[in-house]
Image (spheres, rainbow, N blue to C red):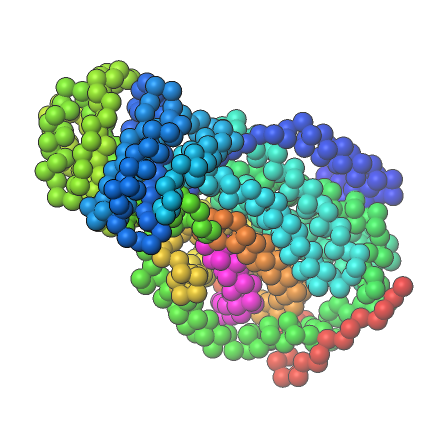
Amino acid sequence: MLANRLPRLLTGRLSAWAALVLATLVAVGVIGSLRGAEVAAGHGSAPASAESSLVTQLTEELPDADVQPLVVVATREDGAALTDEDKKGLGELTGSLPAAEGQESFGPIMSEDGRAGMIQVPVQVDTLDNDAMRATVDEVRGAVADGLPDGLTSHTTGGAAFGADLAASFDGANVRLLLVTIAVVAVLLLLTYRSPILWLVPLTVVGIADQLAGVITGVVGERFDLNFDAGIISVLVFGAGANYALLMISRYREELRRHDDHREALRVAWRGSVPAILASNVAVVLALSTLALATLPGTRGLGIASAVGLVVALAAVIVVLPPALAVVGRGAFWPFIPRPETATTPVTTATTGGRPSFRRDPWGAVATTVVRHPWRVLVAGAALLAVMSSGLLGTTVGLSQVDRFRVANESSAGIEVISQHFPAGSAAPFTIVTDAAALEEVAAAVEDIHGIAMVRPGAAGQTASRGDIATLTVVGDAAPGTQAERDLVHELRETLQAVPGADALVGGSPATDVDSREAAASDMRLVVPLVLAVVAVVLALLLRSLVAPVVLLVINVASTVAAIGAGAWIGRQWFGFGALDTDVPLLAFLILVALGIDYTIFLAHRVRSEVPGQSTRAAVVTGVRTTGVVITSAGIVLAGVFAALGVLPLITLGQLGLIVGLGVVVDTLVVRTLFVPAVISILGDRFWWPSRPAHTPRHAEDIDLTATPEPEREPALTR
């Protein structure tokens, strides 16, 4: 059988070396041949079928579609009104700015308060080439700096400027994320293993898996036109890979105390840990794969790419890690080398007269207390989760383009200056596409809407895929990202639907925001039930129970909602986040449910495997005692790597890192250690229905709850 032959091949004296060499050659070949693919992030992008996306597609068909306006806004350094000399200087500056061929800059447009002037510079922009776009924006900014009148200060903003600033803000960010992630994992593994050698083995294996996953997901993203953040993929691969490695190495160390041959111990550990690792990975991968049905481009791309990355992490841990451990040998655990003569594993019933005896350690003590008072623990845990969930009260969803940046940049500053001196919507105008014959009727209908500050005709009578079309640029009074702006989008669309023959569409960044919000809500309603169904099926197959999956999922969902609520509250109170970004709730829910189920599987699988030899309550104590360290270590590692997302320049990623990191800590220290054991203890054998676990008659139903736990002793140093 493969389950017997594969671990022997991976751990043999010669075959282990052969497996390592082959894995290295494959990794180097794949990384070398596939490197270079690039994908774009999808934050804020609406679905291709959304009205705002249709407007973008139609305007891209028009002549000069690659011409976009950069906006230069100038104010006096002393905040006073611009003088006639200042206005004259801005007029001269307008004529000197490098506009696109055949285009002219326009301005200055003076604000009503007279304290700001605005210049529009049409430039040719290749949005698919970040370097070219940055060069164009830098050229305009350089010309502005050279020709700006004395006493004035300026900011250059607009769509292309935002794209350039976003690209610039990521300069070196992914490298910083990788270095911080490696440092976090290295420190936590070193503290976990207390060995200067062992931590290097899983870190090296997972690090190579991360690089391999990066190039493979890049090719997949480029091939299928997916949008996702590579940083999140890297964090997922590192976090999940480290978790899988911790589980396998924990079982390996346990078996080393039973076997003289470290290769045999490794084979037993492989067979004992791979089912849980495989079930965990399958659950997460299938859950992430459901995002292929999402409509938001960034969400769909992230789900598919994450699933691919986690498959790579799984392959690295179950195929490459065992031969690496086999080659290094038992000495990898130095200075605390586990040997059979120092075994501290549970004593069998044969030597204890029928009653299971457990090594007294902190995890055993905690588990015993929980089993002894499950209702108290359950009520206290429910109260804690309820308090955390209350953080959702007052939480809003949706960040403006400016609010998505964690670091200051010229584009964001320019938007703020424009909002102070011009109609609030000047920084984010609407684009309306209509049938050319109905242009005048559409313009008149728009001008009659309350909250419209300006209507400016754009291209008229241009041929596109839907015939002759015309465009309008519309500026509203509502500030970007506000509910008033979203209401204006809906009012525009409702009004224009009533214009006969217009077939008008409303686009622009305000409309994109509305469409993205609606798509996110739709994705939540579709994806969440699918994710829960997938996880339930995996749990049912693994635990051979119909009750256990329902109970564990209810607990998992409650923990996830609590984490999102607490994270949202902390973000508002401590970090000044005005709202959660549109795709954060869904991504946080999915990641926490999918990854949180890892620890459920690790614990429940161990409890289930212990049930045939003892009562369910006793098995809970054994399960918590044997998995407590590895689950806690895995949770802390995962929380640490997600916290590393805070080094990236987007608020979205910082929010996701905060919520997931907090959720994993709570899941590890509270839910998996206290809540789940309490519920299983209350339900007893009913937890496994419809299966009927057979207990050894010699084992008492209740374990010894009266003995005082003794502290765990440090294992003797063995060289």
* Residue 333, horizontal then vertical, whole percent: 80, 59
Name the quadrant of the N terminus: top right
Q: Quadrant of residue 70?
A: top left
Q: Nearer the viewer, residue 117 or 438?
A: 117
Name the quadrant of the C terminus: bottom right
The answer to if 671 sits in the magenta stretch is: yes
* Residue 319, horizontal then vertical, whole percent: 72, 42
The answer to if 184 sits in the magenta stretch is: no
Q: Residue at x 26, y 45 (%)?
A: 83
Q: Which residues are magenta?
A: 655-684
* Residue 335, horizontal then vertical, whole percent: 83, 64
Q: Residue furthest front?
A: 85
- Tell me: 216 left or right of 395: right
* Residue 97, horizontal then vertical, whole percent: 38, 30
- Tell me: 113 left or right of 258: left
The kind of secondary structure the magenta stretch mainly shows is helix
Q: Quadrant of residue 711?
A: bottom right
Q: Nearer the viewer, residue 496 or 407?
A: 407
Q: Residue at x 47, y 28 (%)?
A: 128
Q: Residue at x 15, y 24 (%)?
A: 439
